[in-house]
């Protein structure tokens, strides 16, 4: 939950499955309700933004929907950013019964949706093999609720070769005169030969932040988002390789994203990746 201030520096809570061990508790729907009740009792339930990501529990996700709907009644301008984390590369890593909750309830209340290709296919029941397929799937997702849809990663081939990852975005807008328009973009990101944990969380958080500053310009918001990722990943891999030593692959601890060290790039990134308007 983000409360009425520019969302530039966002804390990311990440479960790191690349480590051999991890600890912590799973927040239940009942516990979420108790926390939200405390927020309401203190009359501080006035938010501009909500961002959600990974969850494995259907009742928790349904409670999120109830809370979002109530907060939107309090603030009709509230923006809900949903990263429907369910799986990747053809495999789900959450229980299958969470899919209908996302598809039938969550997407309908989301304003910005950030699935990867596999998650977009799950939500729509459509397969993406071409860029046109992807554009059609984003249109279907628009019809389900959100005005902004970003496919954060796809298996599509970049015009610049297989060393680039293709992302696509689509934003529905209403002009001051009441007419409607759609901005569709493609953005290609250089691949890095390393496994990072948290880049998806960082992407969604930065998209929220830069959409706050560019609410009607998805191209600008995505360029700044991806440029932030570029700078953070470049700084991380440079640090990790130096710590690992010549000829050795960095370990998960060395590949922890260098977020604090990238503060200036997060706040004001040099644009190193440009989007193409489709």
Image (cartoon, rainbow, N blue to C red):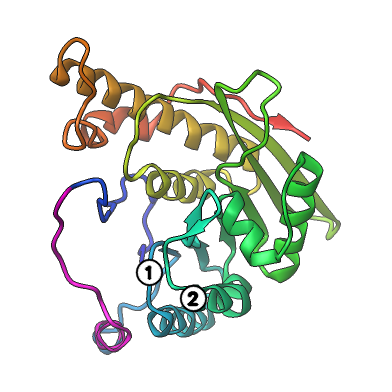
Residue where numbered disc 2 is placed: 98
Residue visible at 25% across and 82% down in the picture: 35
Q: Is residue 90 above or below residue 252?
A: below
Q: Is residue 122 left or right of 87 when viewed as pictured?
A: right
Which residue appears at 36% of the width and 66% of the height? Answer: 1
| Magenta span includes 126 | no
Mark 2 residue element = helix
Q: Quadrant of residue 276?
A: top right
| N-term mark: 1 or 2 | 1
Disc 1 crowd, CA 10 A, few/some/many (<14, 14-19, 20+): some
Provide residue 27's location: percent of width, then percent of height.
25, 76
C-alpha gap between disc 1 and disc 2: 9 Å
Q: Nearer the viewer, residue 196 or 41?
A: 196
Q: Quadrant of the C terminus?
A: top right
Q: Which residues are magenta?
A: 20-36
Q: Note whether 198 is above or below 190 in the view shown.
A: below
The answer to whether residue 174 is visible is no
- The answer to the question of whether label 1 and label 2 lie on touching residues, with beta carbons closer than 8 A, is yes
Residue 194: percent from left, percent from top: 35, 28
Residue corresponding to mark 1: 55
The residue drawn where x is 19% and y is 10% is 246
């Amino acid at each position: 939950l983000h409360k009425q201030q520019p969302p530039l520096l966002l804390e990311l809570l990440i479960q790191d499955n690349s480590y051999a061990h991890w600890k912590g508790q799973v927040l239940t729907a009942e516990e979420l309700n108790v926390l939200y009740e405390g927020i309401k009792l203190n009359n501080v339930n006035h938010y501009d933004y909500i961002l959600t990501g990974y969850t494995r529990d259907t009742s928790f996700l349904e409670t999120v929907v109830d809370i979002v709907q109530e907060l939107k009644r309090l603030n009709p301008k509230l923006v809900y950013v949903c990263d429907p984390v369910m799986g990747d590369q053809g495999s789900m890593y959450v229980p299958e019964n969470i899919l209908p909750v996302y598809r039938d309830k969550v997407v309908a209340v989301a304003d910005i949706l950030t699935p990867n290709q596999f998650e977009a296919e799950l939500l729509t029941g459509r397969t993406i093999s071409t860029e046109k397929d992807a554009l059609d799937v984003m249109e279907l997702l628009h019809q389900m609720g959100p005005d902004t849809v970003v496919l954060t990663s796809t298996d599509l081939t970049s015009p610049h070769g297989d060393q680039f990852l293709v992302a696509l975005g689509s934003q529905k807008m209403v002009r001051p005169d009441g007419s409607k328009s759609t901005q569709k973009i493609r953005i290609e990101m250089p691949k890095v030969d390393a496994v990072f944990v948290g880049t998806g969380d960082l992407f969604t958080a930065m998209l929220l932040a830069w959409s706050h500053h560019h609410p009607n310009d998805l191209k600008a918001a995505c360029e700044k988002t991806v440029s932030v990722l570029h700078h953070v990943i470049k700084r991380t891999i440079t640090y990790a390789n130096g710590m690992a030593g010549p000829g050795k692959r960095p370990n998960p601890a060395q590949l922890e994203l260098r977020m604090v060290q990238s503060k200036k790039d997060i706040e004001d990134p040099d644009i190193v990746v440009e989007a193409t308007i489709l």
